[in-house]
Image (spheres, grey):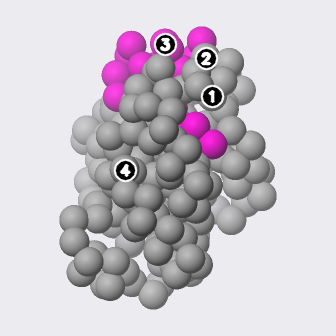
């Protein structure tokens, strides 16, 4: 993992996740966020969205699965690498994570913890390719603690985090950061 990326995430453990232009404007004006997860856009707008965020001096991570017009193939990662200034990607697809690593992008593997099988079946290759694992929903301190101690990869908690207590519970359980689309949490 690139040290600068890790430092950006851990220095300010509340990550702004943006899902529309309104969120973009709020994150650009926020002095409290240094890392932004882009959860929207399409092939014609993503470069501009990333550029605006980079101009604000922030670290940008693009969620591959949520950019309209990008396929689930590894070539989509090539597109992000070639045509944007993104620092990294988020994906639920391990092949995209592998390709991003080859291209020297920072990588976040996103998983939805819906039952114990998800935890049991985590691919052992995760450690090789994912710099960080983001688990959703982020309101599971017990699961965060188990994964943080057993996975060997830093954890970000995301999804449904809306109060200071949620942030503290996730961080105290072992997450290095939380991600949220709630601008009120960004300012905590």
User: What is the magenta range?
Assistant: 13-29
Rendered position, 114 above or below 183 = below
Is residue 25 one of those drawn in magenta?
A: yes
Judged by depth in the image, the label closer to the viewer, 3 or 4, is 4
Quadrant of the rendering where the C terminus is positioned:
top right
- Crowd class of label 3 (few under 14; some 14 to 19; many from 20; radius 10 Å): few
Q: Which residue is mark 4?
A: 139
Residue 188 counted in the magenta span: no
Which residue is rendered at x = 24% and y = 81% of the image?
117
Q: Real-space Cα distance between discs 3 and 1?
A: 12 Å
| Disc 1/disc 2 C-alpha distance (Å) | 6 Å
Report if the CB atoms under discs 1 and 2 are less than 8 Å apart. Answer: yes
Query: CA–CA distance between discs 2 and 3?
Result: 9 Å
- Counting residues from the start of the chain, the first of labels 3 and 1 encountered is 3
Q: Is residue 80 left or right of residue 117?
A: right
Q: Position of residue 24 (x, y in %)?
A: 46, 19
Asked if 122 appears above or below 7 in the picture, the reply is: below
- How far across and down, in percent of the image, does residue 33 sit? 63, 28
Mark 4 or 1, closer to the camera: 4
Q: Mark 4 vs mark 1: which is more N-terminal? A: 1
Query: Residue 33, labelled with which disc?
Result: 1
Residue 98 lies, in percent from the top left, at: 48, 72
Q: Report the quarter where the N terminus lies.
A: bottom right
Tell me the CA gap for discs 4 and 1: 21 Å
Residue 25, numbered label: 3
The residue that mark 2 highlights is 30
Mark 4: which secondary structure? loop
12 versus 120 height, above or below:
above
Nearer mark to the viewer, of 4 and 2 = 4
Q: Is residue 43 visible?
A: no
Q: Quadrant of residue 56?
A: top right
Disc 3/disc 4 C-alpha distance (Å): 27 Å
């Amino acid at each position: 993992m690139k040290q600068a990326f890790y430092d950006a995430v851990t220095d300010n453990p509340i990550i702004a996740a943006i899902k529309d232009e309104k969120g973009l404007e709020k994150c650009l004006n926020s002095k409290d966020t240094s890392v932004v997860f882009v959860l929207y856009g399409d092939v014609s707008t993503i470069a501009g969205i990333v550029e605006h965020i980079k101009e604000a001096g922030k670290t940008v991570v693009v969620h591959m699965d949520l950019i309209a017009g990008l396929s689930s193939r590894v070539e989509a990662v090539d597109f992000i690498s070639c045509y944007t200034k993104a620092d990294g990607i988020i994906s639920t697809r391990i092949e995209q994570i592998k390709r991003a690593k080859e291209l020297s992008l920072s990588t976040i593997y996103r998983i939805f913890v819906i039952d114990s099988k998800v935890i049991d079946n985590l691919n052992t290759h995760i450690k090789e390719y994912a710099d960080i694992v983001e688990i959703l929903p982020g309101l599971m301190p017990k699961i965060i603690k188990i994964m943080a101690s057993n996975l060997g990869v830093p954890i970000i908690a995301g999804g449904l985090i809306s109060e200071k207590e949620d942030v503290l519970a996730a961080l105290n359980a072992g997450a290095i950061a939380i991600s949220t689309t709630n601008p009120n949490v960004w300012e905590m």
